[in-house]
Every structure is written in C-alpha cells, then in structure tokens.
Amino acid sequence: MKGNNRIGIITDDDFAIKNVPPYPHPTFLSYESPLRIKAILDYLGSKEVFSNERIIRIEPLPIDESILGLAHTKYHIESIRRFSNRGFGFLGDEIFITEDTFELAKKAVGGTIQAIKSVLNYDVNQSFALVRPPGHHALQEKASGLCIFNNIANSIIYLKKELQYNKKIAIIDIDAHFGDGLVQYFYDDPDVLYFSIHEFDFEEVDIGFIDELGEGEGLGKSINFPVPMNISDEEFLEFMDVLEPILLEFAPDLIIIASGFDLYFADPIGNGLLTSISYYNFTDKLLKIAKNVCESKLVFILEGGYSLIGLPHCVYAVIMALLEQKYESPIFEKIQFPSEFKNEDLSKIKNSLRKLLANYWISLK
Ligand SMILES: [Zn+2]
C-alpha cells in the first residue's frame, strides 16, 4: 500500500511551550495556550501512541517567509512581525502578541504544509498537524479570533501556486465556529469545496448561513450547516447526510479537516455537548468515504478546542479511528446532559440545505 498504512503526527515542542497568553486566569485570550498542545502530547505519550509502528512523528520544516505572502497582505505580516519584535501587545479584543507569536504562527503554517505534503507524497496515508495558533478566522489583511495566519488557506494556495497542484480539495470544518476567514479564500474556486458545521452565533458573526453557497464558478461549493446550541453525540453526525453524497460526487483528491474540538461539552468557548466519541465516529465514517474517493488521503489540522481536559481525548479519539482500533470514552464523559435541544430544528436545517444544494449536486436531487 502506498503510504505504508502510516499516520503522521506533525508537531514541534515549541507549540507546547511558546506564545504564552499574557494573563493566566481564564479569559477568552488565555484559552489559546501552549498547555493545549502539552496536554495532548502528554496524553498521547501516556497511551504510547508514538510507540505504535503505524504512527510517525514529524517535525515541521522551516518555511520561507515569502510563503506567508501568498495568503496575507504585506501590512498584516509586517504588523505581526513588528509587534512580536516589541514583545507584547494586543490587536483588538481577540489577539494577543508575544515575542514568539510571529515565529510560532509561521511554524503553524509550515506544519500544516508539511502535514499535507506528507500525505500527497505518500510518506503517510493520513496526517494530523498539532499546531497553534489556530488559523481559520484569519483574514488576508488581519488576525482575528485567536488566529494569526490562515494555516489551511495558506497551505492550499502554496500547493496550487508553488507546487502546481491542480486537483480537487475538500475542506471539512468541524470547529464550533464558522471559518469566516478560510471560506473567503476559495469562495469562487470550483476546485476547493468548503463544508462547515458550526453553531449559530447571531450576535457576533453575521455570516455562515445556509444560503451562502459560494459565487461564480464556486457556486454550490461553499456549504454551511449551522447547528443550534447543545448539540449532542446523538445528533452530531446528521450533517453527514448532506456531506457524504457531496463528497462522493465531488470526488476530491484530498480531504482536509479543520479540526476544532470546541463543540466539546466542557469547552469554555463553544456551546455544544459533544464528547470524544463524536470525533471518533466522525473520523471512522470519513475514513470509509475517503477510502472510496481519495485513497484515504485525510489531513487533520488542529483549529480550536480549549478544554485542557477534553482536548487530549478528542485528538486521541481521532487517531484511534484512523488506526481502525476500538475506542473507549473516558469515564468522566459518561454523564447524561439535560438538553433543550430540539431535533426538529436540525431536520429543518438539513432539509432546507439539501433543497438549496439540489441545484448544484445531482446526488441531492
Ligand atoms: Zn472555534
């Protein structure tokens, strides 16, 4: 088998040490902390994941700074660099800058590129980039929502422009929040499908609705599946009824998962009620689809997910599904949540979305 049935985990100890939030007590800014990666790596270590012969750990190679310019304006790149050189600062309410921010954010782009290249080159069959800061909110001209550079967008543009990669890519964004930065890069691109499941957030973000379907040649290739708060393990995979036929019809060469784990029940920012089994089940389903459409080429890129207790379990659940091994949820997740969630809302969203998409996808007619 090409890729030797191996899974690459792309990470660097710097992600577990550097870019420490300026204030340690729980606030929005403090959640994006090196402890996220440290907690994941410690847990994977305790489960002896790195001793598994199918897993290889890969360090990100340094990237040339010019690569950032493929996805971001000079002004944005320079402002992050200068702020980092100064050593400390804030950009609005949602970004903190330390002396490490510029280099670490650049490394996150490098790690994402490497995760994708290692799969496209068949060094491994699937990969998971454990990188930070996250990327999917970052815009061409500015940082946003804890994201500095848009790791996934930057990597895809790099593939297309620098490596002349011209095959189809599907991005599946499972972060609790809409990837308002990521979606904009490919809104009119017929070769990049963007599918996002995210919670309703009418107060802060006024995009991410079901009728935003892309534009020009990209019409029908930008798909939003918003979900009400308190979505649970039982309902989470409803979106696969829309996504699966589209993936089979679109037949991408590569599937990238913007892997945010902030719909997890203990996440301090998201409003979902998921436990780690949802991420296991999702990965298990997706792997089966990927075997059919893209030689199982799946690349997971860490986005959000801020529960230091839950995040390691969610990542481990994904890896166990990729290894096609059984997964046992931790005992503390086995509680019943009181839920106000109404399943009819989800069915309504699903049916309305399928109707809209039937104009663009034969499989949904
Ligand atoms: Zn998020």
Image (cartoon, grey):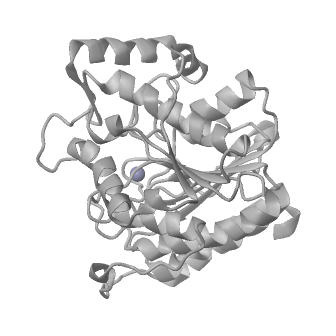
Determine the residue located farthest toward the right in the rendered image: 362
What residue is shown at x 54% (from left), y 82% (from top)? 344
Q: Quadrant of residue 238?
A: bottom right
Q: Nearer the viewer, residue 195 or 98?
A: 98
Q: Nearer the viewer, residue 207 or 313?
A: 313
Q: Quadrant of residue 267?
A: bottom left
Residue 264 shown left or right of residue 195 in the figure: left
Q: Quadrant of the C terminus?
A: bottom right
Looking at the image, residue 179 lies above or below residue 109: below
Rendering coords of residue 307 (x, y %) = 28, 60
Q: Nearer the viewer, residue 135 or 126?
A: 126
> Residue 109, can we see it?
yes
Rendering coords of residue 104 (x, y %) = 37, 29
What residue is shown at x 68% (from left), y 59% (from top)? 5
Rendering coords of residue 280 (x, y %) = 51, 72
What residue is shown at x 65% (from left), y 34% (from top)? 156
What residue is shown at x 70% (from left), y 55% (from top)? 4
Rendering coords of residue 114 (x, y %) = 58, 36
